[in-house]
Image: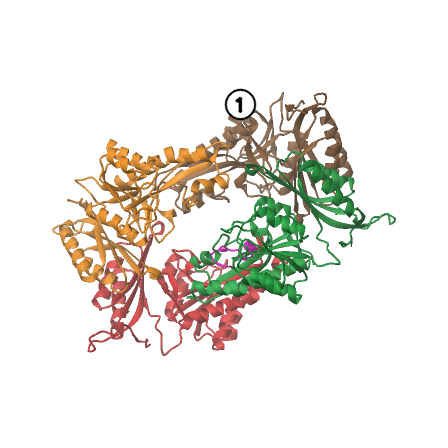
Chain colours: A orange, B brown, C green, D red
């Protein structure tokens, strides 16, 4: 695996290596004491520049999380990886390193779905057509409804749900780790990822499709909520998941359609599910994969 | 002036007149005692069926209002008009009768504007093109910025604002009364009509263009409010004004557009003002004039 | 049953009877055609002055409702009652007449409860102590949890719930009709009254206790919702139920308590349920029964 | 100045120094590159444990901020202070170190006010009475209205406003720096502190009094906003200011009062300003000064 090397702020001393690449290091553990120090020492010793640190605690759940974004000379990449492993083994922290600067290969997607097939199908088709320049590496679901889709598009399929559809959240992360997933795409996946999962893939790697306009219509029934206030416009929102914050600041794409007064709710929901949601997610994933947007201090920035 | 006669629920006795037409009677006065009785007696004596009554008080302002929707035999129309005049003279109430069942003539519009020319121009052009099957009877403004528009489209122009742009609200209603206006179109008119004006033309006769998606983005700066929560979708809302209620239930049309992340607010506002708002209002006015929607118990209903 | 006669606006002709009393007439039916006319004709013929009319439709449910508030000479009370019966028989409308001007007897309360005993007990005790000048006429519940309370305070008990606690809403109204209930007190009754029930006892006769501060914390879990946004103040709201509108305008009483940071949610809920809610409802019912507040055009007004 | 030394997690090796105290280091600069590294290196070399790091950017304003909370052996306090100075001089960052573990002296308050005298007077009186165990070190205002209060309580007075009341925000911070202020108390100070000022005193050192219940009633007119939705409960909120977040999670104290229906807004505002707000702020400042609450990852925690 070879990563891109981007020129940033050329060093005044031309003899020194002046390239660097961006890395995101996430660490999750049960105690905020001892969370920051080993990571900070590690990146400092590797000569990395620290661009961003975010720490959070969920004290009710004894879950402590840190995201560190650094710029590192490419010849130290292996050292970073080894150091992260060493810290993980020594401290018990769950640590991941990842760079958004991907070259010489296509980004790898995990497509998560539950019941509805329209949006996962649209993503799979857009990947096949080259509209999304990525690889559909795995499909993951807590239900069986989309299994035939995986077969149709020849993508490895993993079921992580029990008989009632309850998802094994750790298994989802394990599958993504094992398959070196770059981006987790929630294509109408109807389970909520726990904070620990979200933190493990923090930094702009989890892309969700919400079937309403955010931030106005969150919740489980956005079509019905908008209908109840007699709106004539319905929408979908593709956004990065950042667990500590409202979803309003991490919007990658929004799509809408308008209907005339008197349109029944069933027709609205059908049009949303069959046309608007798939188009919204495909364009959102395309933007991320194409590098047009990134998360920067928990906000979307255009990188074009 | 001849009104439509629509067949409704044919009477079992074929010898009786079985046609009727809908009338809306509004009454506004300074005291809620004595407001309802004369109207109710009048329509009862004329043999009208009462379909709807709405009463409100604004006790802080000593303003009491009533809307009565009745079905009346067409041969009693003149009697209704005379009775309304008589009550008005006798009681001092401000009374208006109006029927949405307009035939043999085009509905007459009063187009109200302030600074921006895009939406009033779009309405005037759509009237000229026949897209809106109405007559642009007058233009009314509290400023001079749109006066040349009136000249260009050869529509009588009335200024109701003083040097600071403060509007004479009574004069606005007087102009509409004198020109037998059916619908008041607020095409980016930047003054708020007082409750007494709204009540005088109640029942689905005042059409407003709000430059944001309702009910999510009310207020004076909906573009900036949506931008502040990092939305990528911006919209406009055409709605009937019903003063006692939130605007959420009276939406006639909504139009939207989406932008990619990083689009500056200035470009968003410009696109909204120049393209989206005019299209939204034109389609909304067209729906009302074409009789596709009506207000019914303060809610929009499709009449198709 | 004798009602109060209050002097209002003495007639210039002293020989005519110049007393009048207020009546509220509610009518509920399946069709808005034919709803208003018979009521309006009736009160007109009886010489009543119409003070207020509210009509609503729930077209999805084919439910049409009207509230009429009139002032009537006391010697026509029997005529009104008979006319209402006659209309009801002839048209199939569900009609009720009631006057808030109660004298020579105590107002009769129906106390509705489900699981929690604190608030119904507090109301029963306040009635027994004379703090609330009313009669606890019946207790109604969809569960059995409060039955012993009824026995303790010697109040007739009616169960209207099935094995799963689903309430028979019609039976609730029937019980109130049969026992000539003036006010329905929802003392932590955990079922939502349907619009048809609310309309039958419209005009300020249904008093609810909500266990959160309205309008900020509606919903089923107001303690938890306030806790989630880290509030340190918790409250309860006693309000009239008016089904077509937000509850914000019909507040009779609000009570609060504040806690220091770190107070666990369980302690907060307990204090709210055991102390704050009962006190809030008792004072609210007292205000209504004592005639200190009334509903007037869907708003609370102080009548002191 | 001597700081407290608290025992934390005794080290298994008794020969090592096992005391530590908490320090908050804030750094504000115009560029996020180079913000984190010098601070992180410094605390690492001093042997501090990093408990918390928060970084934010305000890219529109080129303002980058970091808060670092560390635990440090008391014998390294002077080294930390010197290192911070050295970094500040070398990098141009605005750096402050402060410990909430204050002993052998009273915490020093800067009391900021504008027009109303009730809340600053209440704080001054509570300090004089010993109810708040602090020293009123300075009063700061953008207006002259409270100057006589400073004289009455013999507290140094500083005016930072121009003729129109516009405040010199840098001067406010300079005064606090020079007078070694521990806590800035905004006692109805009617100017908004800019993010750069808030970051310089981040970590739970700026205590605000908002004259409404948060988060329900933010904004400039919370009494009127609550009145407009017909609430009967009015409140005040004492909270730490944390600029990047809603104020809902940093509440130190809330106080409320309830009124009967019909109470005029003027009487409500008067009671709020004269009784409720002063009591709310005094108790809030008392809690902070007494060490009963602290900010921990942007949330209030009880430290009792």
The stretch drawn in magenta includes residue D223: yes
| Quarter residue C96 falls in | top right
Which corner quadrant holds the N terminus of chain A? top left
Compare residues D170 and C121 and report the one nearer the observer: C121
**In this picture, which residue range is highlighted in magenta?**
D213-226
Side of A50 relative to A217 (left or right): left
The stretch drawn in magenta includes residue C10: no
Label 1 Cα neighbours within 10 Å, binned few <14 / some 14-19 / many ≥20: some
Side of D304 relative to C199 (left or right): left
**x and y percentages locating residue C103 in the rendered image:** 74, 57
Compare residues D137 and C222 and report the one nearer the observer: C222
**x and y percentages locating residue D249 in the rendered image:** 41, 59
* Secondary structure mostly seen in the magenta stretch: loop
**x and y percentages locating residue B277 in the rendered image:** 47, 34
| Quarter residue A41 falls in | bottom left
Q: Secondary structure at mark 1?
A: helix
Compare residues A33 and A272 and report the one nearer the observer: A272
User: Which residue position is annotated with label 1?
Assistant: B128
Q: Is residue B45 above or below residue B166?
A: above
């Amino acid at each position: 695996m070879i990563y891109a090397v981007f020129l940033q702020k050329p060093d005044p001393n031309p003899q020194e290596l002046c390239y660097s690449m961006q890395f995101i290091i996430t660490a999750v553990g049960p105690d905020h004491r001892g969370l920051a120090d080993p990571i900070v020492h590690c990146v400092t010793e590797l000569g990395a520049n620290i661009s961003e640190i975010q720490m959070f605690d969920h004290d009710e759940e004894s879950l402590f999380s840190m995201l560190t974004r650094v710029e590192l000379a490419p010849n130290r990449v292996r050292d970073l990886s080894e150091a992260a492993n060493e810290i993980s083994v020594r401290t018990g922290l769950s640590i991941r390193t990842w760079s958004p600067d991907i070259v010489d290969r296509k980004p790898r997607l995990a497509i998560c779905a539950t019941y509805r097939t329209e949006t996962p199908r649209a993503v799979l088709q857009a990947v096949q057509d080259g509209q999304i320049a990525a690889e559909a590496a795995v499909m993951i679901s807590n239900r069986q409804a989309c299994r035939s889709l995986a077969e149709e598009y020849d993508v490895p399929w993993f079921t992580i749900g029990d008989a009632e559809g309850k998802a094994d959240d750790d298994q989802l992360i394990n599958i993504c780790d094992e398959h070196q997933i770059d981006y987790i795409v929630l294509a109408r996946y109807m389970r909520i990822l726990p904070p620990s999962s979200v933190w493990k893939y923090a930094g702009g790697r989890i892309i969700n499709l919400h079937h309403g306009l955010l931030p106005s219509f969150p919740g489980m029934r956005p079509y019905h909520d908008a209908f109840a206030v007699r709106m004539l416009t319905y929408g979908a929102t593709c956004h990065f998941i950042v667990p500590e914050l409202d979803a309003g600041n991490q919007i990658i794409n929004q799509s809408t359609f308008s209907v005339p007064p008197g349109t029944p709710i069933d027709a609205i929901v059908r049009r949303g599910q069959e046309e608007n949601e798939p188009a919204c997610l495909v364009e959102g994933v395309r933007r991320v994969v194409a590098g047009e947007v990134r998360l920067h201090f928990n906000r979307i920035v255009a990188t074009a």
